[in-house]
Image (tube, rainbow, N blue to C red):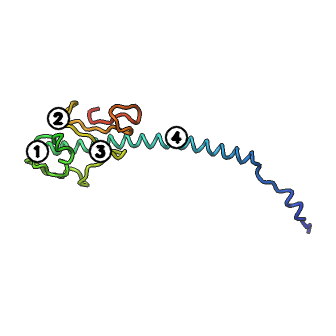
Amino acid sequence: MKKIEPEKYISNTRGFTLLELIVVMVILGLLAALIGTNYIKKSESAKVKAAKVQIEMLGQALDSYRLDTGNYPTTSEGLNALITDPGVEGWDGPYLRKNLIPKDPWGKPFHYQSPGTHGEYDLFSYGKDNTQGGEGYGKDINSWE
């Protein structure tokens, strides 16, 4: 049996050079940046869709309220009229399952006006930027579009 001398074994092994490590780190950084931006885009797109669904759900609750009482809640009564009896004849709520008014996906309250400028009521979220108007993911999400 042939005996391996420790010096020969050590001299035949080779580690990574600094240049190879830097190249690998740059490639990993590029992949992380590419995946990260796609994730952020998908996340914001999902929040816009969730806001639209929440507005639709609140709209259905408002319609049930109107069927029972004959009117939509006033602006001063607000969305709270869906979970707390505002003293209106025919109120048969609460009209939301969890007895709480959801916030938009960005953690802000939905805005409600009745009578609205676009219909019997206006229900909307200012989106990601929480300011009126906006572009892209900061665009307002509303019940009349």
At label 3, the amino acid type is Pro
Q: Of callouts 1 and 3, which one flags the residue occurring earlier in the amino acid sequence? A: 1
Q: Residue at x 26, y 40 (%)?
A: 111
Of mark 4 and mark 3, the one earlier in the sequence is 4
Q: Which residue is mark 2?
A: 115
User: Which quadrant would residue 75 be assigned to in this image?
Assistant: top left
Sequence-wise, which precedes: disc 2 or disc 1?
1
Mark 2 to mark 1: distance in Å? Answer: 15 Å
Q: Which residue is mark 1?
A: 69
- Answer with mark 3 or mark 2, whichever residue precedes in sequence: 3
Residue at 21% across / 37% down in the picture?
113
- At label 2, counting other C-alpha atoms closer than 10 Å, the crowd grade (few under 14, some 14-19, many 20 or more) is some
Q: Nearer the viewer, residue 108 or 38?
A: 108
Is disc 2 placed on a helix, strand or loop?
A: loop
Q: Say whether marks 1 and 3 touch (CB < 8 Å).
A: no
> SS at mark 1?
helix
Is residue 22 left or right of 92 when viewed as pictured?
right
Query: Within 10 angstroms of label 4, few (less than 14), some, or many (20 or more) residues?
Result: few
Residue with the most extreme left position: 89
Q: Which mark is residue 78?
A: none
Kindly identify which numbered label has been placed on residue 109. 3
For residue 64, side relative to residue 9 (left or right): left
Residue at image position (44%, 43%) is 43
Amino acid residing under circle 2: Pro
Q: Which amino acid, mark 1?
A: Thr
Callouts 2 and 1 close, C-beta under 8 Å: no
Q: Secondary structure at mark 3?
A: loop
User: Which residue is label 4 attached to?
Assistant: 37
Q: How many marks?
A: 4
